[in-house]
Image (cartoon, helix red, strand yellow):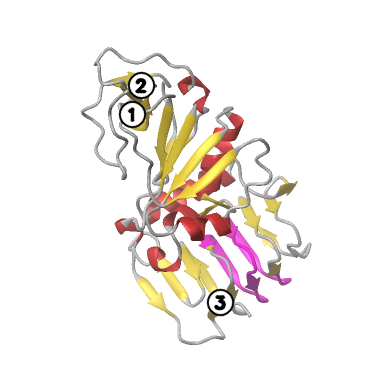
Amino acid sequence: MHSIIMTYNEISNLGPLNDKSVPALLPVAGKPIVLHLLEQLHRSGIMSVSVVSRTAHDEIDKAIDTRPLLGMSVKFLPGIEQNGGVNHDILVIGTHQLVDTSWEYANGREANNSGTGITRLTSSTDETLGLLFHAHTKQCIPETWIDFSHYEKSNCAGTINILKIESLTGYRAANFEVLNGECKHLFAAGRQVSPNLRVAPKAQVPINVVLGKHVYIGGQSRIKDTVKLFGNVVIGDDVYVDKHARITNSIILDDTYIGAMTSIEDAIVKGNMLIKIDSGVCLTITDPVLLSEAV
């Protein structure tokens, strides 16, 4: 079986996050979305994958290290090769959502009775998880994720947690659910060093930092003493959080400086950009003492 991962140039409801990253590369609990999908496919025994992006395939290729995915062949392509049909089953999934499931049930699944040679894999609530193009179908694979509701459904997975990354609140929920261990088939980056703390290599976290419910600290990030991290907090790579800063239920993206005494709550921060998650309001902080790109 082969799999195609469809990516997006932007997801409109993510607003300014589209300007900071290709959506497929947005981190969820320390890993890019596309890497979560590749790891899921690898664990499911699907070892041939094409990641398709019309404009960012080279950027995604450079950002994703596929070496740990032993035995998997991954190609990063600007489009789908269409030859008037396929000679093996192809599973098509998208980077707009993370589905908490194993894709093993799709491997070798019989075609439906519609005659199209296409099966829409669905949850018990009729949400589309992926599309299965069976061997020898003459149907062309669409270049973008479209409304697939007209295809015959196959409720093969029961009740499934679907993390939809189509809004700021959805992006926050995906981060926190994976971080909290609420998913069976999606895993946060780093290693667990205490019940409420995961860290990536070379992260520096003093013992007197106040930790909340669940916290992830990315690689080479430095958290100064007297910092307080409340609730769920995800901190990316190469982040510097200065003394007496306070972060609550927020996501701090890579290469960001959080100034001393700065308070962040229910927000996504990247450099000097602060996005309030619930309202979508985006603020540019001009005082580098408060927020800035990490040096």
Tell me where residue 150 appears, x and y as whole percent: 21, 28
Cα distance between the residues tagged 3 and 1: 57 Å
Q: Which residue is mark 2?
A: 136
Q: Residue at horizontal 37%, vertical 67%?
A: 16
Q: Which residue is mark 1?
A: 85
Badge 2 vs badge 1, beta-carbon distance below 8 Å? yes
- In the image, which residues are magenta? 223-251
Viewer-proximal residue among 71 and 37: 71
Tell me where residue 185 appears, x and y as whole percent: 56, 33
Q: Residue furthest right?
A: 207
Instruction: Answer few, some or many: residues within 10 Å of disc 3's Cα (few below 14, many 20 plus, some between 14 and 19).
Output: some
Amino acid type at circle 1 is: Gly
- In this rendering, the answer to whether 177 lies above or below 55 is above
Q: Which residue is mark 3?
A: 262
Tell me where residue 46 appears, x and y as whole percent: 55, 30
* Label 1 secondary element: loop
Quadrant of the rendered structure where residue 158 is?
top left
* Label 2 secondary element: loop
- In this rendering, the answer to whether 241 lies above or below 25 is below
Viewer-proximal residue among 117 and 154: 117
Q: Nearer the viewer, mark 2 or mark 3?
A: 2
Q: Residue at horizontal 59%, vertical 76%?
A: 257
Cα distance between the residues tagged 2 and 1: 6 Å
* Label whose residue precedes the other's in the sequence (2 or 1): 1
Viewer-proximal residue among 150 and 141: 141
* Label whose residue precedes the other's in the sequence (3 or 1): 1
In the rendered structure, find residue 245 and report the number of the disc placed on it: none
Amino acid type at circle 3 is: Thr
In the rendered image, the quadrant that contains the C terminus is bottom right
Instruction: Answer few, some or many: residues within 10 Å of disc 2's Cα (few below 14, many 20 plus, some between 14 and 19).
Output: few
